């Protein structure tokens, strides 16, 4: 019997893949790929691109999450990190173990539902906290590293090799619910990354927003910074939408982050339904 999405999230959360040490998660992903059966490309040492073959027609969909966790311990730790499960919540270092775990779960069951080619993008250095506050805990004291460099490297690889998905969906976690459960949709990246969107990009993004609202009416439209901004910026010239779907997390950027179990399951179900929609629909993004 395969692992549940919660099993995957816990496995990821236990691994101390702190910023600049993201390769500590690679062995788990390579083991997961025995079930996923994707092709794997290592991009600039610590970033991964998994390409899952299609089971239905359609242009590729890119799913993204960041591998790095913030080191809150004042020293490097190589042992398993503590993860606690209660009736309603998961507690641990969950940013972005939730996103990585969800993507691994989606990959592990991708053979069972219709989907176009799927690109799973796992990036380094999404977090800026280590660079700002504890550079001594980063590899080489953070030299030649910058916030968002993983998403930049992955974007450059896709563009160079003309691998253009119809949309990007980043799975991360949001603090904006302040302790309450919920799922947020970030979609207007141009409000935060200083680009001027084309009319085509706005139209495609609104179309995508409307479809998500149809599938999950209680979703909340917010905006915040994460890798979705970088993918949005790099692929805006090609009018490719970039959004983020994010379950609530609180407290945030600490060692005992909490995420509601129902939100993890809901965002996983929503993601599968959204992929399924753009596999079966005659209209692509």
Image (cartoon, rainbow, N blue to C red):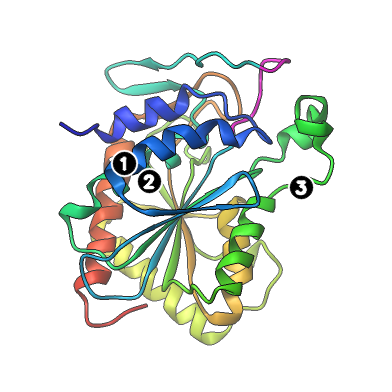
The residue positioned 22% from the left and 82% from the top of the image is 282
**Mark 1 to mark 3 CA distance (whole Å):** 32 Å
To which residue does mark 3 refer? 146
Q: Are marks 1 and 3 in contact (CB under 8 Å)?
A: no
Q: Are marks 2 and 1 in contact (CB under 8 Å)?
A: no
Around disc 1, counting alpha carbons within 10 Å, would you say few (fewer than 14), some (14 to 19), or many (20 or more)? Answer: few
To which residue does mark 1 refer? 34
Lower position in the chain sequence, tag 1 or tag 3? 1
Q: Position of residue 211 (x, y in %)?
A: 30, 68
Q: Nearer the viewer, mark 2 or mark 1?
A: 1
Q: Are marks 2 and 3 in contact (CB under 8 Å)?
A: no
**Mark 2 to mark 3 CA distance (whole Å):** 24 Å
Secondary structure beneath label 2: helix
To which residue does mark 2 refer? 103
Q: Is residue 91 left or right of residue 53?
A: right
Around disc 3, counting alpha carbons within 10 Å, would you say few (fewer than 14), some (14 to 19), or many (20 or more)? Answer: some
Q: Quadrant of the N terminus?
A: top left
């Amino acid at each position: 019997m395969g692992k549940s999405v919660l099993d995957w999230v816990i496995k990821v959360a236990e691994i101390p893949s702190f910023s600049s040490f993201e390769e500590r998660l690679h062995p788990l992903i390579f083991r997961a790929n025995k079930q996923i059966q994707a092709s794997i490309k290592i991009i600039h040492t610590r970033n991964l691109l998994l390409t899952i073959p299609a089971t239905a027609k359609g242009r590729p969909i890119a799913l993204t999450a960041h591998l790095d966790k913030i080191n809150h311990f004042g020293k490097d730790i190589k042992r398993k990190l503590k993860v606690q499960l209660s009736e309603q919540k998961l507690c641990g270092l969950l940013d972005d173990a939730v996103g990585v775990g969800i993507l691994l779960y989606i990959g592990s069951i991708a053979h069972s539902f219709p989907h176009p080619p799927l690109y799973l993008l796992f990036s380094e250095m999404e977090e800026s906290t280590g660079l700002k506050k504890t550079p001594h805990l980063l590899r080489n004291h953070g030299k030649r590293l910058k916030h968002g460099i993983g998403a930049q490297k992955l974007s450059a690889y896709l563009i160079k090799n003309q691998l253009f998905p119809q949309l990007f969906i980043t799975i991360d976690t949001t603090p904006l619910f302040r302790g309450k459960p919920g799922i947020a949709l970030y979609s207007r990246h141009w409000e935060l990354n200083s680009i001027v969107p084309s009319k085509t990009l706005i139209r495609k993004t609104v179309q995508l927003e409307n479809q998500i609202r149809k599938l999950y009416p209680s979703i909340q439209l917010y905006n915040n910074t994460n890798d979705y901004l970088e993918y949005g910026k790099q692929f805006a010239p090609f009018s490719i939408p970039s959004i983020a779907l994010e379950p609530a997390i609180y407290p945030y950027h600490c060692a005992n982050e909490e995420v509601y179990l129902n939100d993890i399951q809901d965002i996983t179900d929503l993601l599968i339904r959204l992929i399924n929609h753009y596999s079966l629909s005659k209209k692509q993004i």
